[in-house]
Image (cartoon, rainbow, N blue to C red):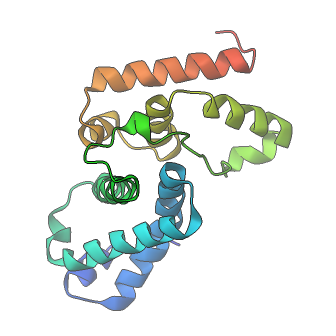
Amino acid sequence: MKLESNDIDRIVNSDEAAFCRFMEYYSSRLYHYVYALIGQKEPSEEVVSDVFFEVWKNRRTLAGIENMNAWIQTITYRKALSYLRKEKGKADLLLDDIGDFIFAPIQSPDEAMISREEMEKINNAIQQLPPKCKHVFFLAKIEGLPYKDIAALLDISVKTINNHIAFALEEIAKKLNIRF
């Protein structure tokens, strides 16, 4: 599913068909992201629904958003944390408190060239990363967000993002017996 070039303008003007295309475009990606944070199917679906409701409520401001991916990712992250805070009854939930960051199986064109066994090794190596490192790795390498957007989303420096990515790649390489 691809968004049409004028879909955002149509959504600003309350075009529900354009909004449906927007939801189809983002829903799977956002669901996997929330599921990675929450680890439960139904609550993840509810959080994604809340995200789309928030987008619809703020549709008049969409045309002014420079990076839609980063903007919607930020809303999703905050909604997932709000859900976790409510569920755990904590006022201050830290990313380290989230626990295992669960990755959905990676689906990419390269996957056809990588055996299932190798994919399992890669996913296992990723699972062994510290929670915050996994989260940064997910946002940068799976979601493809720019480092500066991740830094703003997580309220950390770009240098910290670089450190997390370097550490993650080093650890994954060790687990896969790859030498650089």
Q: In which quadrant will I find the C terminus?
A: top right
Residue at 53% x, 72% y is 1
- Left or right relative to 39: residue 68: left
Residue 141 visible, this orientation: yes
- Is 161 situated above or below 112? above
- The residue furthest top is 180
| Image vertical order of residue 95 relative to residue 125, above or below | below
When asked about the image quadrant of residue 157, the answer is top left
**Foreground of the two, 145 or 101:** 101
Figure quadrant of residue 80: bottom left
The residue depicted at 31 percent of the width and 51 percent of the height is 70
Image location of residue 36, percent across then percent down? 53, 50
Q: Is residue 3 visible?
A: no
Q: Is residue 12 left or right of residue 150?
A: left
How many marks can you see? Answer: 0
70 shown above or below 44: above
Front-most of 28 and 38?
Answer: 38
| Quadrant assignment, res 40 | bottom right
Residue at x 42% of width, y 83% of height: 20
Q: Is residue 165 above or below residue 87?
A: above
Horizontal relation, residue 76 to residue 142: left or right? left
Q: Position of residue 143 (x, y in %)?
A: 47, 47
Residue 49 place in picture, x, y as percent? 40, 74
Q: Position of residue 89 (x, y in %)?
A: 34, 53
Residue ranking furthest to the front: 89
Q: Is residue 42 left or right of residue 115?
A: left
